[in-house]
Amino acid sequence: TALPICLLKMILLFIFLSFLPSSHATRFVHLTEPSPPVTSTASEPFQINGIFPNLAVTAESGPKRSECGIGALMPWADHLYMVTYLSVPNAGAGTGLYEIAPNFTMRTVVSHNSTYANRLLHAPSNQIIIGAWTIDMARNVHAFTQLLSVRIGGVAMHLTDPDRMVYMLGMDGPLYECDVYQMNCTLLFDLVETLGIPKAAGEQPHFKAAHTMNKRLVVASNTFEEKDFLKSQHGGRLAEWMGPGHNWTILESEAFVEVAGRGNFGKVIYALGWDTASVILKVYVGESDAGDSDVGVWQTYRLPKASHAYDHLWQTEWPRIREVETERYLMDMHGQFYELSPLGWAGSTWGIRPICRHLRMIPDYTSYRGLFVLGGNEVSSIFDNNLVTGQSQSGLYFGKTDDLWSFGKPQGWGGPWRYTNVTANVPSDPYLMTGFDKKVLHLNMHADRDHEAQTVSITVQVDITGVAGHIGEQWLNYTTVELTPKTPYLYHVFPDGYSAHWVRVVANETGDLTAYFHYT
């Protein structure tokens, strides 16, 4: 008789529960049955579309107000390190070196009142260098106290003593060598004087990057103001130094903002800059099995500008070339992201194409715990020049690399010639064509005040494989356009669907010419 009684009890229990309010019934069931796993949100950081407000950084509201940009990001010892910057030392307060934990909480490691945008893994000592500090694998932090009031824009490996020394590059021109164990620094050069930057004529030195590879230290300064735009002065610099016993060599007197490269895949050094005409990509291939004549020399390529909102030296901040996916670069320049391969086969650069256009200020980006991380410089009062901004602040974006393809459509403008004194039969620098949709070329012959205008034939040549004329692959003639005194300006619309990797132009006469592409 035990079985029927049990069944009767179960039936009565079921009837009883059916008359209870749903909340009570649920409670009762939870007491008698295993509860499903519950994900607690109480301790999880709040985020909206990859933005974590708790990881935002701010400068104090006053009395001094300048900036609070995120100058460098570096994953290390299971944490993400971040350093922020003021415009100049002591131009405010509230900036610091921060540590973000795997649970996306943040603590201030060091507070500072200066400007830092440098990071480096110093492999021989198993430390990272970020700002004016070293951090070892146990997360112990030590300071280069001599640099606590120096604006540091770059750090690079040492040419002759890489096991214990690094170079630290100040934005205002001082170049130091620093001992990563003794934590002291020695001034080597005032690069403003060494590189002949016309500071007294109003050109502000603004060094942004340093990189050591192929037995040379390469530095970049992105000075570009109105006189640079008008071509009456040239304050920017890209320069290299082979070490003690050698003089510095100025490679370019235009604005350059980034230098980067890997120690393999042909040991290619990339340097990013710009002038009035376009973005400039300088390339140095250190090794190649092809024995190409362009190995060991600097080459010049040109890319479109996606915006003119990055032309002034202050506006660019720190465009970067970084690895966010293993052994492939992501390059940001003048409001546009690009894919870039580290390969330097046959002395050429490979695999560059645009990804997206943006108007973000992105001083650095990296990967952390499987996420793509964008640093920012969202809003700054800059010495109260921006009166609709109160407190300077910046944040981080966490997403995935493929998110970039949902940003703006790749577009831009620029060219190899902008009112350029062109030499007859000398080809222009290669200009990027691949990856853009609609394409128009504008050609203009400018009147020469000292000579009568003459007819000029301009041949448009394309490279369809990406090698830009290397390894014996020839440039192909696409079309020839004739400019005359009566028709000094013509334009050419490329057919829908037409593309090549690089394009260049060649004139048969010397003269002042413009060749400008618009990609939409």
Image (cartoon, rainbow, N blue to C red):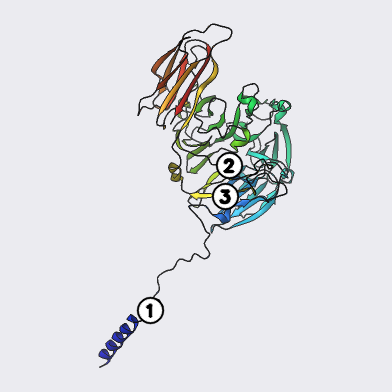
Q: Whole-Å distance between the Cαs marked 1 and 3?
A: 47 Å
Badge 2: how crowded within 10 Å, few (<14), some, or many (20+)? Answer: many
Q: Nearer the viewer, mark 1 or mark 3?
A: 1
Which residue is under mark 2? 363
In the rendered view, would you say 392 is above or below 415?
A: below
Element class at badge 1: loop
Sequence-first tag of 2 and 3:
2
Q: Whole-Å distance between the Cαs marked 2 and 3?
A: 11 Å
Residue 38, quarter of picture? bottom left
The amino acid type, in three-letter code, at marker 3 is: Gly
The amino acid type, in three-letter code, at marker 1 is: Pro
In the rendered view, would you say 47 is above or below 376?
A: below
Q: Residue at x 64, y 30 (%)?
A: 223
Which residue is under mark 1? 21
Give whichever of 93, 387 is nearer the camera: 387
- Whether pointer 1 and pointer 3 mark residues with C-beta atoms closer than 8 Å, the reply is no
Which residue is under mark 3? 395
